[in-house]
Image: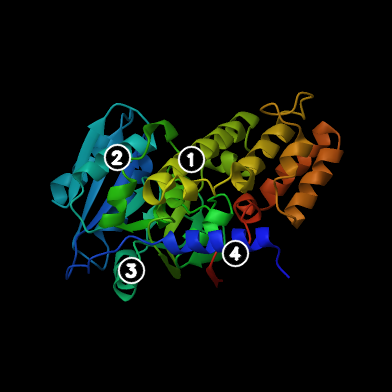
Amino acid sequence: MKSAVESIVHKSSEEIARRLKPVGLEPLPHHPLASVLIANYNYAQYVGEAIESVLNQSYGNLEVIICDDGSTDASCDVISRYIRKDSRVKLLRKENGGQASALNAAYASAQGELICLLDSDDTFHRLKLEKVLAAFSRNPDSGLCVHRLLGVSKLGKPISSPMPRLLYKGWLAPAALKRGGFLPLAFTCTLNFRKAIADQLFPIPAELRFFVDPFLTAQAVFLTPIVTIPDSLALYRLHGEGVAELTAPSASWMTRQADAFLRIFELQKDFVAKLFGQDVAGRLHLEEDVAYWDSLLAAYILQGKPSNGIRGLSADRIICHLPPSRTRHLWRLMLCLPSPVARRVFLLWRVQSPFRRFLSSRLAPLGERVEA
């Protein structure tokens, strides 16, 4: 039998859940314009393929807006060749400021009812826009569409199975509120928005620079239901520093990631407060943001388990924030090992499965799932 305090807490939670309402959307116009936004920096060898993958779409009512973020290679020459061939291609140029600022500039010029993001070293499947439009048409209340992708090598050869294995769909705000606002990480090239939703997400804080996708999903989950497409509709190229960040990250990279997740959590809390009130935002707790604590543990291992901990916290205090799982057991094992061995085990874990981190750090299902 519930105590009086438990009953009050339960009723309060029900009231909060009732107040969480998605943004209403107008019907899509017939044959809407799709704006594909590309941020580019020194990817002259890849950006042409990215542009071609958009121009070759089965759905042709589109524009592709590339913001060059101060490239020092031949990127702008490559892009200019496409501008001369196709009026749907537009180029903006700015000083280097990071992916977030480049996407902001591209978004400011976008005219489409659909907003699709693409990194300049990735590509779209030919049917991508057609399938995204169909998904939005079947789900008129949804303002965010996500799909799977395939990881490919520098030469475009597939090196992964479709990712992510689990796709979460539906109105996830009530469940996210209970879990620190955390959502499974999406990749930039899998994010597609209705413009009415994108208008509330842009501009992205330029300080985030390269942590665009977790920021956008953290905000969007409190705005709109998510519709999913189980197909792999993009190729995600793994090369150079990108491979290292996934398979053998440095302590400094993991610390930067933790800092970014902390900042995203703070921004999300302010965002929720403006939408639903401070009492609702007060339900978000950093203690439940698994991605943040997971990143700190990784930095701690990679730094050689410093005696003063990481960010002033001991590993034991950090690990208490992770939900019971096999991943948590693995972290505990690594913490018991000598530092050089722990680091090797951690890197082996990453190398064996480059995307293991994205999968293992996910929470229990937040809503309805689509599983491969």
Res 342 quadrant in image: top right
The Cα–Cα distance between marks 4 and 2, rounded to whole angstroms, is 31 Å
Mark 1: secondary structure: helix
Horizontally, residue 332 falls left or right of residue 276, namely right
Instruction: Find residue 320 and report its image quarter.
Output: top right
Q: Which residue is mark 4?
A: 365
Residue for point 34% across, 65% down: 128
Q: Earlier in the sequence, mark 1 or mark 2?
A: 2
Side (left or right) of 80 relative to 206: left
Mark 1, mark 2: which one is toward the viewer? Answer: 1
- Look at mark 1 in the image and give the residue it sits on: 264
**Residue under the point 75% across and 55% down:** 324
* Residue 201 picture location, percent across and down: 34, 47
Q: Position of residue 90 (x, y in %)?
A: 19, 45
Residue type, label 4: Pro
Name the kind of residue labelled 2 in the image: Asn
Q: CA distance from mark 4 to mark 1?
A: 21 Å
Question: Can residue 78 be seen in this snapshot?
Answer: no
Q: Nearer the viewer, residue 348 or 36?
A: 36
Give the SS element for disc 3: loop
Q: Secondary structure at mark 4?
A: loop
What residue is disc 2 on? 104
Q: Nearer the viewer, mark 3 or mark 2?
A: 3
Residue at mark 3: 141
Give x and y (percent) for residue 334.
81, 42
- Sooner in the amino-acid sequence: mark 1 or mark 3: 3
Q: Earlier in the sequence, mark 3 or mark 2?
A: 2
Task: Verify CB contact (< 8 Å) between mark 4 and mark 1.
Answer: no
